[in-house]
Image (cartoon, rainbow, N blue to C red):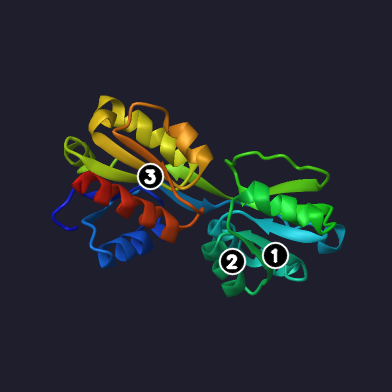
Amino acid sequence: MTDGPPLIVTRPEPGNAATVERARAMGFDARAMPLFAARAIDWAAPAATDFDALLLTSAFAARLAGRGLAELASLPVYAVGAATARAAEAAGLTVAMTGSAGAQRLLDDMTSANIRTILWLCGRDRSDFDARAAAITTLPCYAVDPVPVPAEWDALIAAPATLLAHSPRAAQRISQLAGNARAHLSLVAISPAAAASAGDGWRDLAIAGHPDDVAILAQARALWHKGEK
């Protein structure tokens, strides 16, 4: 596939490098074009005894939370995606469940298990979802900010390419930066919400089967094979 169109990876580090490495091992001409960077922000841990569980929807929460995370170590963790679960375990937390179909589905599973008071350790900018019957306390511990567009961006999107959108915010920024070039560009979104944020006008717009890196790359490979025919 290295003789095909480039695969543009836009997610922040350290995930960008991991995706590029995985993509190149699959044969893609993968290019690292991060459009955001993550950073820790100040936060204070509440009493863990006030909650039934800790919800993590991004690995950044576990990676960037810092020392305050130890005060929540008694709470079982419900993580969206395998990468988030691995980051939680690396930070010394105990993962009770790893969801594979997005935050809403995981929350539904939690409320079905009678988990009612949930602490959501999250980013400053986040997508909302239906709390169902649960009481969710949101606690931002990191921020993901836009960074300057890489110098190679305009040249890369001037010809056919496939872009990966690992979040709704990423999809929205990619769409804005692509402009009319969308007509010859393909985009693979990690979720239906990310696809909706990407808007219309793409040569191809596909959604990963699961909200994780393996699935988004599998969908990119399916698009590449489709283009060969």
Mark 3 = which residue?
188
Mark 2 = which residue?
85
| Left or right of 129 on screen, residue 26 | left
Give x and y (percent) for residue 71: 74, 67
Give the amino acid type for the residue marked by disc 2 in the picture.
Answer: Ala
Give x and y (percent) for residue 11: 40, 50
Disc 3, SS: strand
Give the CA separation, mark 3 to mark 2.
23 Å
Tell me whether circle 1 and circle 2 mark residues in contact (CB < 8 Å).
Answer: yes
Mark 1 = which residue?
77
Give the CA separation, mark 3 to mark 1.
29 Å
| Left or right of 192 on screen, residue 224 | left
How busy is the neighbourhood of tag 2: few (under 14 within 10 Å), some, or many (20 plus)? many
**Label drawn at residue 90:** none
Give the residue displayed 32% in from the left and 37% down from the top.
204
> Which of 90/111 is in front?
111
3 or 2: tag closer to the N-terminus: 2
Give x and y (percent) for residue 127: 60, 40
1 or 2: tag closer to the N-terminus: 1
**Mark 3 or mark 2, which is nearer to you?**
3
Give the amino acid type for the residue marked by disc 1 in the picture.
Answer: Val
Whether 73 is drawn above or below 47: the answer is below
| Left or right of 210 on screen, residue 16 | left
- Asked if residue 33 can be seen in this view, the reply is no
**Mark 3 or mark 1, which is nearer to you?**
3
Q: In which quarter of the image is residue 18?
A: bottom left
Whether 225 is drawn above or below 148: the answer is below
Whether 41 is drawn above or below 65: the answer is above
